[in-house]
Image (tube, rainbow, N blue to C red):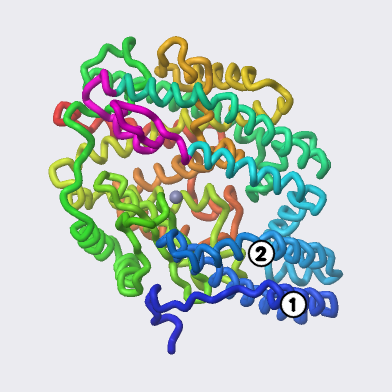
Amino acid sequence: MNKKDLTFDEIPVKRPNLKSIQKNIGEHIAKLQAAKDAPEALKVIRSLDRYMDKLATIGTVISIRYSLNTLDKKIAKLQDMVDEMMPQVSALLNQWNKILVKVPYRADLEKKLTPYYFKMIENSLKSFDEKIIPELVEINKLSSNYDRIMGGAEIEFQGQKYNLSQMRKFSKSEDRNVRRSASLATDKWFAEHEQEIGDIYGKLVVLRDTCAKKLGYKNFVELGYLSLGRVDYDAKMVKGYREQIAREVVPVCQKLYKAQAKRIGIPFNKMKNYDWSLSFLSGNPKLAGDTAYLVKSAEKMYDDMSKESGEFFRFMESHKLLDLEARAGKAPGGYMTFLPVYRYPFIFSNFNGTEDDVNVLTHEVGHAFQGYLSANIKPSDFRSPTLESCEIHSMSMEFFAWPYMKDFFGKDDEKYRYHHLSDAIEFLPYGITIDEFQHWVYEHPNVSHKERCDAFKEIQGRYEPELHYEEGTCFSHGGRWMAQSHVFGSPFYYIDYTLAQVCAFQFLVEMRKNQPKAWKKYVKLCKCGGKYPFVSLLEKNHIRNPFIDGNIRKVIKPLVKILNSFDQSKF
Ligand SMILES: [Zn+2]
């Protein structure tokens, strides 16, 4: 049977066998050591690449199946097996990488595989060594500890118990008293867990700092950047970028916030933190139909957008690669992943009847579209770029979907567009707050929890001056960062969302001028996959580089024009 024709549920679940994996990779390592020249080595490299694609597919099928039904004990066991095997497979690949970068005919290989391919390998070698395994194990444990505490949060509110994400719906209540007491209840939970969470973070920071020092770095900043595969920009460039956001975007946001305060009828200087989630007195944009209706609208939209997007979306549907609706037993959240052997993207989500559902059909589908377009790129390391580049594909697709929003939101379509764009702009100051805080933290690894909170408060005050918490609360003394999971589990990653957003904004502006031209540019970007690091990818695709001084101004100016074109009195 043709592998390409299987639907997702027809794909067999295979049980990985660590012994045979070790044997297979071991044989590849021996063959690489024995290879006398580049053509011979290339054969071995390609063979390992194919084998790793098979392994990745087995692992991904298991993890998808597990998230589709976490109650299935058989799959849960397989998932545990995969988790346990991962470090051992990584150790073998590390051994392989060490040999590969030192082969005498490396220059010949670089001609075939590009210097960037070797740069990526060197990068991963520079950010890992067996001597930091004890710290990494401890870091993983502490991060899951944090996730467990946050996931298990029970907040007493109006006589009921809610978890943290359930509390979010009260922040949009039109009743100010409800918003206020919900915010205070959440804050109280953080105050009660402040010592525990602060402790975990303190330990994480020291452990990451220890890893950095063991590997010969001054502190964790450089190591953190290397771990994220950032080879063509550094912390100094990111600092300059944050300064541009502060100069160009923070004032625009203050105007947006003033308009919001007016819309919801509260004087700007009286607005409190719990008021900012309420964007419109008439409520957030409402969906025009149920899941089936939304998927039909998406089908129509992708058909109209271009031939290849239409084919792609129908491919996803006919191969059952979209699992959208919430069900008992399904893991929370949403994601896009890829099955290399079958060349299938897969989208997982939990529709909840809010505008988030449309986000899955645009943002996650944008990720999947890139996966689909880059499916045949070889070697496999070049299929998908680093994380900041990945978010350009998804965030830009959100904007390419703009002309079709009537089919998703009916009469609320204009409200959706305004909300989407203003939200995306307002996110940038928060994004740089989280980023600057982390730089400060890792440059001062041995300070107390209170000093960290003080630093956060000072940074947040500069970038989000509109935010006022009630006196005496945990967040008023700088504790808000404890609610941001990335700070714990994915250091320095957060800025990626803002960098990608700045790039995606450019597609919005270009699309409104000339849709076919902008779309062509977007498809070309997606087809580049992971062949280039971030800054080179932007250069190759004529996207303004956010690190160049003056570029943020150029990106934001036309957005202000778009924002001003909305008639807010209708919202
Ligand atoms: Zn994304």
- Ligand 1 contact, mark 2 (Cβ < 8 Å): no
- Disc 2 or 1, which lies upstream in sequence? 1
Expressed as whole percent of the image width and height from the top left, the position of residue 552 reads 48, 34
The residue that label 2 is drawn on is 85
* Residue 171 magenta-highlighted: yes
Secondary structure beneath dot 1 equals: helix
Estimate how packed mark 1 is, as few (under 14), some (14 to 19) or many (20 or more) residues with alpha carbons within 10 Å. few
Work out which quarter of the rendered image holds the C terminus and state it: top left
Give me the residue at 76% from left, 50% from top: 133
* Residue 324 magenta-highlighted: no
Give me the residue at 30% from left, 57% from top: 325
Between disc 2 and disc 1, the foreground one is 2
Horizontally, is 95 left or right of 535 in the view? right
The answer to whether 149 is drawn above or below residue 109 in the figure is above
Q: Do the residues labelled 2 and 1 touch (CB within 8 Å)?
A: no
Expressed as whole percent of the image width and height from the top left, the position of residue 422 reads 33, 33
Estimate how packed mark 2 is, as few (under 14), some (14 to 19) or many (20 or more) residues with alpha carbons within 10 Å. some
Give me the residue at 68% from left, 21% from top: 448
Amino acid of disc 1: Lys
Please say whether residue 257 is visible from this viewpoint. Answer: no
Horizontally, is 442 left or right of 15 in the view? right
Give me the residue at 20% from left, 51% from top: 408
Q: In which quarter of the image is residue 208?
A: top right
The answer to whether 446 is drawn above or below residue 551 in the figure is above
Amino acid of disc 2: Met
The boundaries of the magenta stretch are 151-178
Q: How many marks?
A: 2
Expressed as whole percent of the image width and height from the top left, the position of residue 98 reads 81, 62
Q: Which of 532 and 270 is in front in this view?
A: 270
The residue that label 1 is drawn on is 23
Residue 246's disc is none
